[in-house]
Image (cartoon, rainbow, N blue to C red):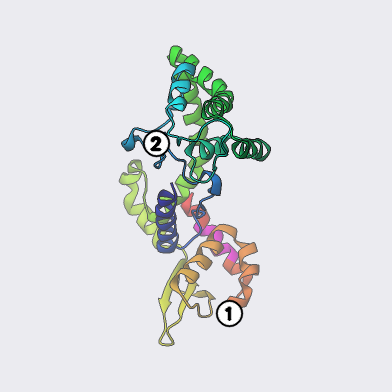
Amino acid sequence: QVQHIEMARDMASSFNHIYGGEFFTLPEAQVEENVATLPGLDGRKMSKSYNNTIALFSSREQLRKLIGSITTDSRTPGEPKEVEGSALFQIYQGFASEEETEALRRQYAEGIAWGDAKQQLFERIDRELAPMRERYEHLVAHPAELEDILQAGAAKARRETLPLIRELRSAVGLRSLAQAPVAAKAKAARQALPQFKQYREADGKFYFKLVAADGQLLLQSLGFDAPKEAGQAIGQLQREGEAALSALQPRLQPADPQLVLAALQQLRDAAE
């Protein structure tokens, strides 16, 4: 639902801002206007709470019975009918092609009988859902096959997400508990690494600098209007190295590229 997409955008944007990078791509909702909200059997918004839904995996006969119960008006066969406000037509439109939709629209104007219109809707939906219903029933009857599919999907998800998970854990400072015995060494190693430092000046703008372990200034930025912009620039440098250094050059004061690149490599090696 669009509300869930908005929540995901808020969380992703907040994480990117706090930890200074483009870790998450903000999702965009894509909803086709003609299926943004489907009416239910009674004409209200289709919702389980209204008990007016068409279950996707209903049997063929259950599907026929549900569609037969769609609320229509009292206009008789041969009497022109309106598509506006017709739950039957709107549900059909959600499944049909533009050509099929226009054909039913003409039949409405010509006075199609409600029974015939419901039969067309049943046939169109059943044609769409029948292969899915067959697959669903097969998997329910063969749980071992279903489990294999789930495990294969989980393995694929882990392969594709592990690099990002590692990057996220590094960004927030999480480390494996197995490293606890060498915590002192890790702390010393971190202290010996170059560091990005972000700050705000009296002019109200936000800056960052990269300093070596011995305190030598390696890189100094110009002012950014928002802390998020400065954080994103830091993240870009950490991820892209030389390419980011070139792209961000107008926002940076002159620096020795070789020293900066060596420091960025040190940070990447430490993160791994």
* Residue furthest out toward the right: 99
- In this orientation, which residue lies closer to the viewer: 166 or 131? 131
Q: Please give the name of the residue rendered at 43% of the width and 63% of the height, measured from the top-left corner.
A: 17
Instruction: Check disc 1: other Cα within 10 Å, few if <14, some if 14-19, many if 20+.
Output: few
What amino acid does circle 2 point to?
Asp
Label located before the other in sequence (2 or 1) = 2
- Quarter residue 62 falls in: top left
- Work out which residue is located at the far bottom of the displayed protein and give it: 203
User: Residue 141 location in percent, x, y?
Assistant: 44, 12
Q: Residue at x 50, y 65 (%)?
A: 232
Above/below status of 128 relative to 3? above
Q: Which residue is mark 2?
A: 42
* Mark 1, residue position: 253
What whole-number distance in Å separates the C-alpha atoms at marks 2 and 1?
Answer: 67 Å
Q: Is residue 211 visible?
A: no
**In front: label 2 or label 1:** 2
Looking at the picture, which amino acid does disc 1 mark? Gln
**Total labels drawn:** 2
Q: Position of residue 61 (x, y in %)?
A: 46, 16
165 over 53 or under it: above or below: below
Image: magenta residue range: 261-267
Q: Is residue 69 left or right of residue 132?
A: left
Residue at 59 percent of width and 37 percent of height: 108
Q: Are marks 2 and 1 in contact (CB under 8 Å)?
A: no
Whether residue 70 is visible to the viewer of this picture, yes or no, is yes
The dominant secondary structure in magenta is helix
Instruction: Report the disc number at residue 211.
Output: none
Closer to us: 215 or 111 = 111
Q: At numbered mark 1, what does the secondary structure look like: helix, strand or loop?
A: loop
